[in-house]
Amino acid sequence: MLTVAEAQAIVLRTTRPLPPATAALTPAPLGAVLAEDVVSDLDMPPFDKAMMDGYAVRCADLPDGRGALAVVEEVTAGRTPRHALGPGQATRIMTGAPIPDGSDAVVMVERTRIEGDRVVIEDRPPRAGQNVMPRGREMRSGETVLAAGSELRPQELGLLATVGRTRAVLQPAPRVAVLSTGDEVVEASERPGPGQIRNGNGPMLCAQVARAGGVPHYLGIARDSLESLRPLIAEGLRADVLVLSGGISAGVVDLVPGVLQEADVRPHFHKVEMKPGKPVFFGTRGDTLVFGLPGNPVSALVCFELFVRPALRRLAGHAEPGPSVVRAALAEEFAYRTDRPTYHPAALEEGESGWRVRVVPWHGSPDLRGLTKANAFVIFPPGDHCHRAGQVFEVLRVE
């Protein structure tokens, strides 16, 4: 049986970024990855500008930092100076405004006072360039300001707007079909009958897709019959990724593997040495990735984070697809017996001495409520152990 690391390697070897496409930058495509270098179309700032409110002066007029200068005009942000400074002159200036020709420093307003049409300055001797940002200090026209592969956060989107970009070539968000299966499953809007449960996996997996940067498309619930499964799986195979939950184990009504085989899905693995989530399936048909996750919700969530999320991030062009694993010290002693590596729900926090992890109460793979107090999974090795407080373990982050 494959280890988790071996299965992850197969997924990432099989997954290639989607073809880039030109897209609008509004609404903001947060988390998208640039597929082109972006070049500035202007110097920024486009002029020598004041960095604070005050007075533009000539350093030569204030050799000891003190003096009275004639105020020739006031320049606010968005306006340009009309007068160059001559000897003994100053311009009242606001933050962000261009400084006038002839000036070489700005004295902050707090170091000045007005007497009639003159400004009296009492400060240290100004230095050339004081409180002035020179033209082109941030970037020059023709300079590459964002490289292909950059992930778009609010600051990158602001920079794109600054250089006049309303569209850019991006790695598109993967389209992900989500299909729940099982005769026992009903939608959240329904009252479960005898032997039935509401479908928590569908909304949970759609939310995980969105959090990973994909675009979820919920296909509903397929019943445990070939007539129900075949058309819904066929529809899901038109997406970039198909994620199924349930019906992949070895039970009498676990029909999903057979239907995938009928649909020419090539299997890459089926079963991984882990708990929960052992029956997880991964296959491909053409460029479509297919993940079959166990029906128990905690199993589905863990398998998604370990295998599906990295695939979605690779499709979207991220250089580091994850998953995010840190090493953390156990906060409290914990006894645990398991026959294979186990992903146990936990609360992870970062302190002054590094990461610490605390096991949260959990009643097994159907216990979705237990996950509401968790933001991570601590990975326990197989065997019968009494883990000591302070012992360091790998921890899968899921925030």
Image (cartoon, rainbow, N blue to C red):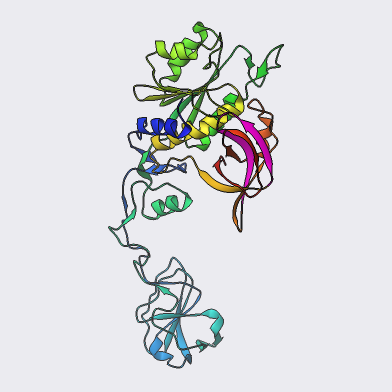
Front-most of residues 99 and 332: 332
In which image quadrant can residue 100 be found? bottom left
Asked whether the viewer can see residue 33, the reply is yes
Task: Between residue 30 and residue 335, name the one nearer to us.
Answer: 335
The correct choice, above or below, for 138 with respect to 247 in the image is: below
Q: Quadrant location of residue 275?
A: top right
Image point (65%, 29%), residue name? 368
Q: Is residue 216 magenta?
A: no
Chain part drawn in magenta: 332-350
Whether residue 174 appears in this view of the structure is no
Residue furthest out toward the front:
384
Q: Is residue 373 left or right of residue 315?
A: right
Give how far across and how far down residue 226 sits, in percent. 50, 7
Question: Camera-side residue: 254 or 390?
Answer: 390
State the residue at coordinates (50%, 6%). 227
- Counting the numbered discs, the total is 0
Image quadrant holding the C terminus, namely top right
In the image, residue 256 lies at what x, y percent? 49, 14
Image position, residue 115 (x, y; %): 55, 89
Q: Position of residue 255 (x, y in %)?
A: 51, 11
Does 336 lie within the magenta span?
Answer: yes
- Mostly what secondary structure, the magenta segment? strand
Work out whether residue 372 or residue 222 is closer to the camera in this orientation and state it.
372
Q: Residue furthest left?
A: 142
Up the image or down, 11 lies above or below 104; here it is above
Q: In screen coordinates, is 374 left or right of 206? A: right
